[in-house]
Image (cartoon, grey):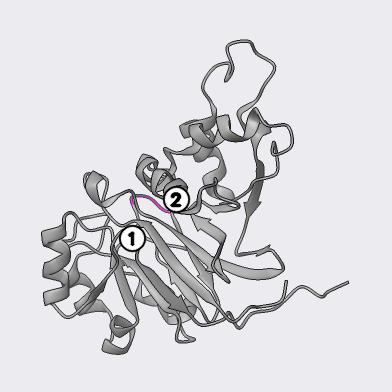
Amino acid sequence: MTVAADWALRFQGVGNASAVALGSPMATIECDGAPWLTIDCGAEGLTAYLDHYGEAPRALFVTHVHLDHVAGFERLFVDRYFDPARRARLPIYVPAPVVPLLHKRVGDYPNVLAEGGANFWDAFHLIPVGDAFWHDGVRLEVFPVRHHWPETAYGLRLPGSLVWSGDTRPIPEMLARFADRDELVAHDCGLHGNPSHSGIEDLQREYPRELLARCVLYHYASEADGAALEARGQRIARPGARFALRPPGVAQAPVA
């Protein structure tokens, strides 16, 4: 594809796992106003996506397999499997160590159809990925983050445009490498941190001011907590919010 002038990130949900009213954390990279790549697929986030775009996601990247990030997969299976023209056409990019975890979480129910004859992944185009992958002619990068257990959660970079932290504690060493081109950084942050998520004091302690100024915070617990984060001088995302992105300055696949 040709890199278009109009890139953006639109949030479908911004809450933590308990903040149902804020929606499950999920966002979509848009190119010229159309959905290009969606990050995660939680239940509330998928509902918001369908309400806004009027269609199912065109491509997905999965950061990790907690249910607030993957609970929408069964709905996508039904949407895709029973339409032969769309079956096996939705690319699902999954970091390779996460693939068996995702299968156990959403794909391993005995006899996915009562009448038999189907496998869960027949509905999708599952693509295990390593440190980088290509989508629609554009190269994206993947990096590990700090969430619960090593090699179970990952962030995503569209170089020169966007860094998505995924659920994580502070990762200054990763962002020094993967957010070094003035990207917008969408970062997990609540008002208070815990052993698997960042809090505002964590970020303000660990990150330089220049990086914090590029951060948009999501995965907080309530509207009140979001307002408190703003009072601490930080930008937050709200459901439906759209943030302009710079066009990615990345390697492009050659045009045949």
> Disc 1 residue type?
Thr
The residue carrying mark 2 is: 49
Quadrant where the C terminus is found in the figure: bottom right
Q: Magenta stretch: dominant SS?
A: loop
Near-viewer residue (11 or 172):
11
Name of the residue lying farthest toward the top: 115
Sequence-earlier tag: 2 or 1? 2
Q: Which SS class for mark 2?
A: helix
x, y percent for residue 168? 33, 60
Location of residue 202 by image quarter:
bottom left
User: Can residue 166 be seen?
Assistant: no
| Residue 29 percent location from the top left of the image | 51, 65
Residue at the spot 63% in from the left edge and 55% down from the top edge: 129
**Left or right: where 35 falls relative to 210:** right
Q: Residue at x 55, y 38 (%)?
A: 100
Magenta stretch bounds: 148-152
Name the one closer to the observer, 80 or 165. 80
What percent of the width, then of the height, locates residue 181?
49, 86
The answer, for residue 211, to whether it is visible in the render is yes
Dot 2: within a 10 Å radius of its alpha carbon, few (fewer than 14), some, or many (20 or more) residues? many
Q: Is residue 72 magenta?
A: no
Residue 168, numbered circle: 1
